[in-house]
Image (cartoon, rainbow, N blue to C red):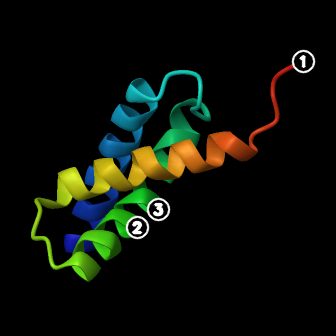
Amino acid sequence: MEFIWAIIIGGVAGWLAGVIMRGRGFGVIGNIVVGVVGALIGYLIFGALGIVLHFFFAALFGAVILLFVAGLFKQPAT
């Protein structure tokens, strides 16, 4: 059951990260996927630093970072 909540929270965080990072997103579905992956990244980063943070904020931070990095490699629309 925790896995399902992690996907839901990661999806919401990905959507919110897409709103924060306007112009660097990948659409609603893409941002949700980025949010789920970003949740894992944020959880690992904060865990490695020894910082205890609510899962949603770690997911949001990870999703914003991942959107930023992915946006650097995204080809501009023609």
Q: Mark 3 and mark 2: span between their CA atoms? A: 6 Å
Residue bearing mark 2: 41
Which residue is nearer to you in this view: 36 or 61? Answer: 61
Answer left or right for 72 relative to 61.
right
Above-or-below relation of 74 to 59: above
In the structure shown, which secondary structural element does the residue marked by tag 2 occupy? helix
Which residue is nearer to you in this view: 40 or 32? Answer: 40
The answer to whether mark 3 and mark 2 are in CB contact below 8 A is yes
Residue 1 shows in this picture:
no
In the structure shown, which secondary structural element does the residue marked by tag 1 occupy? loop
Answer left or right for 10 relative to 49.
right
Residue neighbourhood size for the residue with mark 1, other residues' Cα within 10 Å, grouped as few (<14), some (14–19), many (≥20): few
Please, what is the three-letter code of the amino acid marked with disc 1?
Thr
Above-or-below relation of 63 to 41: above
Residue bearing mark 3: 37
In the structure shown, which secondary structural element does the residue marked by tag 3 occupy? helix
- Residue at image location 90% in from the left, 18% down from the top: 78
Residue bearing mark 1: 78
Please, what is the three-letter code of the amino acid marked with disc 2?
Ile
Please, what is the three-letter code of the amino acid marked with disc 3?
Val
x, y (%) of residue 19?
A: 40, 25
